[in-house]
Image: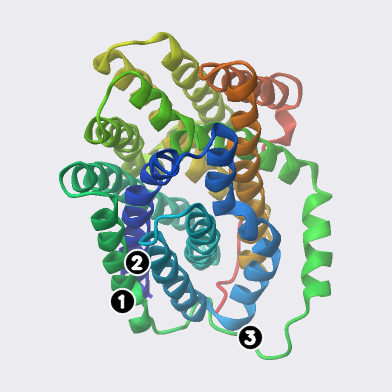
């Protein structure tokens, strides 16, 4: 199992380096091709289009067919996505985003499913911390690496490096399935939909998913209109990549200590901090003009986001059926996909109607509203730990 976890962590890191390289460049490439803000929002949102509809089946497939097979399918999708990015037209960008979103989803759901099956609550919390740390590391390195390559050589060369990183993901072929191994029998979509309906009937799960949605909706700015806003201020692509990497680095700093944070603080206090940090971090950005002050706001934003994701994962795992961890993580990713899909599209129309600053203020208000509802009026919705008496083999 330790060998499997190491391979999963390496592949997870490669996936996020590739993702970090590509996501700031896609809206900039679209802008160079003459796309309007609404079309840019559509292109960015396409990353989550297929993922939203396939989240429940992919979660069920992971439970049924095993982590290794789903990870290998994710490698194929990522490589295909990078190949399409090498062709500079809007249709290829949209298709690439759809495939890239599917590959990204396969890696995330499968890896999180593997961790959710772990027996000990403390071990789950620590391992989710390691998983999110590798993700944050990849997102810290990816944007600055992609920005430097794009500035010095061009977008095509940056997309070529992303292809090489996708192929390197074949390291997961060395996984030996034990935990998360395939189950015998035919796959049943209706069975998974019934399990999903049960999960959605739990008000605590709905609260966790709403919290997750609000934060991811806000963070979608990082992949859509934050790069556009920063370029409008006269920054170069390398500076944009550096600022986004600063955001990722700030969320990376908190990830190695997630296990200790879970032990030291209540979930209510952790959620309160993340809500305030995300809302104020993103809400300050439009009013800032210097590189330094923008970097500080992105650090606050990143710290909040850095705590939000492992907190969300752990709470969903605590509320999940131990026999269907892939399905529970698929449901969570479906909500994330919906936020990533609606965020750029709705905020794109907001930019066209009001201006480039408006989506930052609107997103900050959304996060504060969801956080206030859960923390002030419905604190009982926060779940406790799920204890598992017997490990799943």
Q: Earlier in the sequence, mark 2 or mark 3?
A: 2
State the residue position of label 2: 11
Marks 3 and 2: in contact by CB < 8 Å? no
Label 1 to label 3: alpha-carbon separation: 23 Å
- Residue 376 - label: none
Is residue 298 or residue 332 the one in the foreground? 298
State the residue position of label 3: 183
Q: Point out the image quarter for the N terminus.
A: bottom left
Horizontal side of residue 10 vs 59, given as left or right:
left
Q: Earlier in the sequence, mark 1 or mark 3?
A: 1
Judge the density around disc 2: few (<14), some (14-19), many (≥20) Cα neighbours within 10 Å: many
Is residue 177 or residue 236 the one in the foreground? 236
Q: Visible in this render: residue 199?
A: yes
Quarter of the image holding residue 243? top left
Q: Visible in this render: residue 323?
A: no
Disc nearest the viewer among 1 and 3: 1
Q: Where is residue 242 in the image (x, y as percent from the top left)?
A: 25, 34
The residue positioned 69% from the left and 70% from the top of the image is 57
State the residue position of label 1: 171
- Residue at disc 2, secondary structure: helix
Marks 3 and 1: in contact by CB < 8 Å? no
Q: Which of marks 2 and 1 is nearer the N terminus?
A: 2
Marks 1 and 2: in contact by CB < 8 Å? yes
Horizontal side of residue 196 vs 332, given as left or right:
right
- Residue at disc 3, secondary structure: loop
Q: Position of residue 205 (x, y in %)?
A: 72, 46
Q: Position of residue 64 (x, y in %)?
A: 64, 80
Is residue 315 or residue 54 the one in the foreground? 54
């Amino acid at each position: 199992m330790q060998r499997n976890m190491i391979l999963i962590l390496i592949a997870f890191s490669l996936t996020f380096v590739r993702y970090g390289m590509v996501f700031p460049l896609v809206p900039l490439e679209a802008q160079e091709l003459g796309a309007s803000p609404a079309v840019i929002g559509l292109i960015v949102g396409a990353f989550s289009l297929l993922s939203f509809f396939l989240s429940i089946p992919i979660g069920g497939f992971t439970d049924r067919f095993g982590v290794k097979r789903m990870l290998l399918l994710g490698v194929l999708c990522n490589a295909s996505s990078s190949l399409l990015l090498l062709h500079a037209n809007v249709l290829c960008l949209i298709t690439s985003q759809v495939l890239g979103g599917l590959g990204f989803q396969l890696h995330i759901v499968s890896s999180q499913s593997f961790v959710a099956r772990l027996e000990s609550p403390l071990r789950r919390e620590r391992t989710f911390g390691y998983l999110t740390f590798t993700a944050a590391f990849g997102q810290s390195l990816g944007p600055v690496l992609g920005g430097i390559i794009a500035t010095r050589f061009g977008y095509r060369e940056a997309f070529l490096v992303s292809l090489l990183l996708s192929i390197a993901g074949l390291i997961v072929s060395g996984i030996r399935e034990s935990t998360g191994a395939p189950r015998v029998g035919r796959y049943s979509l209706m069975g998974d939909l019934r399990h999903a309906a049960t999960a959605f009937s739990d008000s605590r799960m709905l609260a966790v998913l709403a919290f997750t949605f609000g934060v991811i909706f806000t963070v979608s700015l990082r992949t859509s209109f934050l790069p556009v806003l920063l370029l409008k201020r006269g920054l170069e692509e390398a500076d944009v990549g550096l600022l986004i990497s600063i955001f990722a680095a700030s969320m990376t700093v908190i990830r190695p200590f997630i296990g200790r944070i879970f032990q030291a603080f209540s979930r209510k206090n952790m959620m309160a901090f993340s809500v305030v940090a995300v809302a104020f971090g993103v809400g300050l950005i439009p009013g800032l003009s210097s590189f330094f002050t923008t970097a500080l706001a992105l650090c606050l934003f990143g710290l909040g986001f850095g705590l939000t994701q492992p907190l969300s994962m752990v709470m969903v795992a605590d509320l999940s059926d131990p026999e269907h961890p892939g399905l529970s993580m698929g449901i969570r990713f479906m909500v994330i996909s919906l936020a990533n899909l609606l965020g750029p599209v709705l905020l794109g129309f907001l930019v066209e109607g009001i201006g480039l600053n408006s989506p930052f203020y609107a997103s900050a208000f959304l996060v504060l509203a969801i956080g206030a509802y859960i923390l002030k009026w419905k604190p009982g919705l926060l779940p406790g730990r799920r204890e598992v008496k017997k490990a799943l083999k």
